[in-house]
Image (cartoon, rainbow, N blue to C red):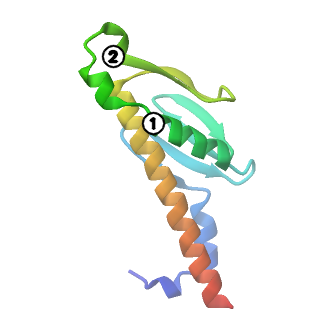
Amino acid sequence: MWPINFIRMAEFSDLTSKILFETEKGYSYQCDLTNSIIINFVDTVSSYKIQDFLIFQRKVNSVDILNMLYDLSDHSDAQLIETTKRNFSRNLTICEIVQLRELLNGTKFTLNLHSMLCSVLAADLI
């Protein structure tokens, strides 16, 4: 494995056209042409500008899973998850919400890591 100081900027630009994060139920990637994050989750494809992606990620993370688990009524077995711009609108089960959280949180982590590595490399070049 190469130390971080030897990674070329060209290698970093290649990362943006590849998968950012992948799980059993979906994957995410960054589209350089539209400057957006594409989420493919259980055969539903949605596109987000970075700010919309972060809002969606916070919304999914705010779902109270424990409350859904302890609520024995039938209506608590699933919850409608949708975005403000209607990029994504699905009634998800508890398991699907957890799986979507994993995908969105992993994507956010990858974006943060990539951003941090780029700033370290940019500081080294100055």
Asked if residue 123 can be seen in this view, the reply is yes
Mark 2, other Cα within 10 Å: few <14 / some 14–19 / many ≥20: some
- Residue under pointer 2: 77
The disc, 2 or 1, on the residue closer to the chain's N-terminal end is 1
Residue 101 point in image, percent of width and height: 42, 40
- Classify residue 79 by image quadrant: top left
Outermost top residue: 74
Q: Which residue type does callout 2 highlight?
A: Asp
Residue 41 point in image, percent of width and height: 48, 33
Circles 2 and 1 in contact, beta carbons < 8 Å = no
In this rendering, position of residue 118 left or right of residue 34: left
Look at the numbered disc 1 and give the secondary structure of its residue: loop
- Residue under pointer 1: 62
Q: Residue at x 34, y 26 (%)?
A: 94
Q: Residue at x 28, y 17 (%)?
A: 71
The answer to whether residue 11 is above or below residue 96 is below
Q: Residue at x 65, y 38 (%)?
A: 47
| Quadrant in which the N terminus is drawn | bottom left
Residue 49 point in image, percent of width and height: 69, 45
Residue 43 point in image, percent of width and height: 50, 28
Asked if residue 25 can be seen in this view, the reply is no
Q: Of residues 73 and 45, which is closer to you in this image?
A: 73
Q: Which residue type does callout 1 highlight?
A: Ser
Q: Nearer the viewer, mark 2 or mark 1?
A: 1
